[in-house]
Amino acid sequence: MNRRSFVATVLITALVASLLTYGGIRLYDRALYAYSVKISGVPADVAKAPNFQKFLEIIQLIEEKYYQNPKAPGAEGRETAPPVETLLEGAAAGAVAALKDPYSVYFDPRGLREFKIQTSGRYGGIGVMMQEKDGYAIVVRVFPGTPAATTPYEGAPKGAEPGLKPGDRIVKVEGQDVTNQDLDHLADMIRGPEGTQVTLGILREVDGNWEELTFVLTRATITVPLIESRMLEPWKIGYISYAQFDEVAAPEFRKAVEDLRKQGARALILDLRDNPGGLLTVAQDAAAILLPKGVLTYVVNQKGIVDIYQTNGDQGLGMPLVVLVNQYTASASEILAGAVQDYGVGTVVGETTFGKAVVQQTWTFPDETGLKLTVGQWLTPKKRTINQVGIEPDVKVAMPEGAEMGDLRKDPQLQEAVKILAKELGQPQPTFPRVGGKP
């Protein structure tokens, strides 16, 4: 062998050796990852997916190559790359966000605490309930006596009615654009210590035009009045407003119905307007009072498997019933209204509902993070699908400008409910002033 051939052979051997060594390292690393995937219980189809392998490699490359890695020489005292745990947290949140489902949310520890506060019925904030639609956070309910109900907007003319209103769109918090923001994060931005202030930018429709208003609200400790009840005289019609199906509401609703019976109620109006839903188990408890024993809803999961939720009732309410709904009646409240329709035990009055017929399940993890995930679609007892469609009321009644929910003098939907029940009870038809004061 001549000198030139010898040198070439040495170079080629060295190159092949280096490639084999690098490749061996890569193959070893991949085998190590494959083993870790196997023992962690990752489904085989996920482990084999090219994007999953790419994800593992990206994490590894950040660990090995990112110039601010805390393990790198001279990294002390400077900003460094986030640890693997932080990267994986971001990946988990990104995976849920990739679903593009506004009702599925990954919670960090703070977000999970806020979510639990939302379903507890007591929190520090301004006193509104919100619903997401078309990328906007829409105010669906304003609780009386709270900062949201009593604070005028900046520059409001003398005599203008204070407070936020159902239908208002929250578009800014402290000057930051919050369109397309998930509701749990937005609620976290709005809440804060009692006595502190938060500035909201609101879009409000006035005479067909959208106006931006600014509210500077002082936060307070809010106890949400989930159940409000009273007797409508002289018809002996019980009226119950149910704000949201939170965990504390079930016994309150049962007690309200019992109290109205003791007062001599002969019929019942259940007001689910602006009720954004809540816990299906709480709606199930209400159904046990209102409906005969049977199916409340069918929930169909990704595999087509159907879970059946029963009403767990007995003979039903045993008196005439009207359920009031509107465009912000959503989720579990639609389940209840749809069941009332399908069983024919009451009349649904108002406007077409929101159309959220999907069900979420929540998981809490040991590190105090959580996941709320859409796991199925519900159907009415007659297996009607109403997702993104809503429930059509049996009797349609609009709420014109100047109407006021719950005020019999200014609430045409409530007036219609009383007329329907008076007729069923064999009583003379009542007359009410129209909104605007005309007879």
Image (cartoon, rainbow, N blue to C red):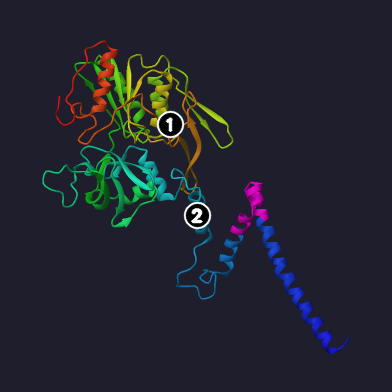
Asked if residue 50 is among those painted magenta in the image, a careful observer would answer: yes
Q: Which amino acid, by three-letter code, is at mark 1? A: Leu
Which of discs 1 and 2 lies nearer the camera? The answer is: 1
Magenta-drawn stretch, dominant element (helix, strand or loop)? helix
The stretch in magenta equals 34-55
Percent coordinates x, y for residue 425 in the rendering: 27, 12
Tell which of 148 and 214 is nearer to you.
214
Quadrant hosting residue 313: top left
User: Mark on residue 35?
Assistant: none
Residue 7: tell me if it is visible.
yes
Quadrant holding the N terminus? bottom right
Task: Name the side, left or right, on which 282 lies relative to 139.
Answer: right
The answer to whether residue 207 is above or below residue 429 is below
Q: Residue at x 31, y 32 (%)?
A: 273
**Image quadrant where residue 341 sits:** top left
Kind of residue sitting beneath label 2: Glu
| Residue denoted by label 2 | 89
138 is higher (above) or lower (below) than 27: above
What residue would you read off at disc 1?
280
Query: In the image, is 257 to the left or to the right of 390?
Result: left
Observer able to see residue 229: no
Q: Position of residue 271 (x, y in %)?
A: 30, 27
- Left/right placement of residue 139 relative to residue 104 reads left
For residue 237, what is the image quadrant? top left
Name the residue located 43 percent from the left edge and 17 percent from the top edge: 292
Q: Quadrant of the C terminus?
A: top left
